[in-house]
Amino acid sequence: MERKYLRPNKMRPVPLDEDFWKELVAKPIQPGLTSSAQSAQEAHQQDVLLASDVANEVNTTIRNNRKIIETEVLKEVR
């Protein structure tokens, strides 16, 4: 038999065992994620931090390139 047929085919999914759900249920809950409300609140806090980081980066870029921006705007107005 050819060697390529002895390896599992990555395109074909592996069938699950009958007890696959027990592994999912038995997983311990992480201490910070005891409830869905808590995890949603943490996700919201992370989103707020990321949004403020993006806003700060945009403001810094605008400040650093103010002369270029003003020059280009004046070209468009004329």
Image (cartoon, grey):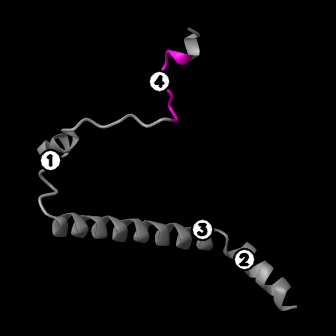
Please, what secondary structure does the residue beneath circle 3 have? helix
Would you say the residues marked 3 and 2 are in contact, meaning their CB atoms lie under 8 Å apart?
Answer: no
Q: Nearer the viewer, mark 3 or mark 1?
A: 1
Q: Which residue is mark 4?
A: 8
Tell whether 9 sits left or right of 22: right
Whole-angstrom CA distance, mark 3 to mark 2, is 10 Å
Instruction: Name the amino acid, label 4.
Output: Pro
**Extreme residue in the front direction:** 1
Instruction: Name the amino acid, label 3.
Output: Thr
Whole-angstrom CA distance, mark 4 to mark 3, is 51 Å
24 and 56: which is toward the camera: 24
Please, what secondary structure does the residue beneath circle 2 have? helix
67 and 50: which is toward the camera: 50
Of pointers 4 and 2, the one earlier in the residue sequence: 4
Let me know if residue 75 is in the magenta part: no
User: Few, some or many C-alpha atoms within 10 Å of disc 1 (few <14, some 14-19, many ≥20)?
Assistant: few
The quadrant in which residue 38 appears is bottom left
Whole-angstrom CA distance, mark 3 to mark 1, is 48 Å
Whole-angstrom CA distance, mark 4 to mark 2, is 57 Å
Q: Which residue is mark 2?
A: 69
Q: Which residue is mark 3?
A: 61
Q: Residue at x 12, y 43 (%)?
A: 26
Of pointers 3 and 2, the one earlier in the residue sequence: 3
Of pointers 3 and 1, the one earlier in the residue sequence: 1
Q: Residue at x 48, y 35 (%)?
A: 12
Tell whether 75 sits left or right of 31: right
User: Few, some or many C-alpha atoms within 10 Å of disc 3 (few <14, some 14-19, many ≥20)?
Assistant: few
Q: Which residue is mark 1?
A: 25
Q: Residue at x 43, y 37 (%)?
A: 13
| Magenta range | 5-11
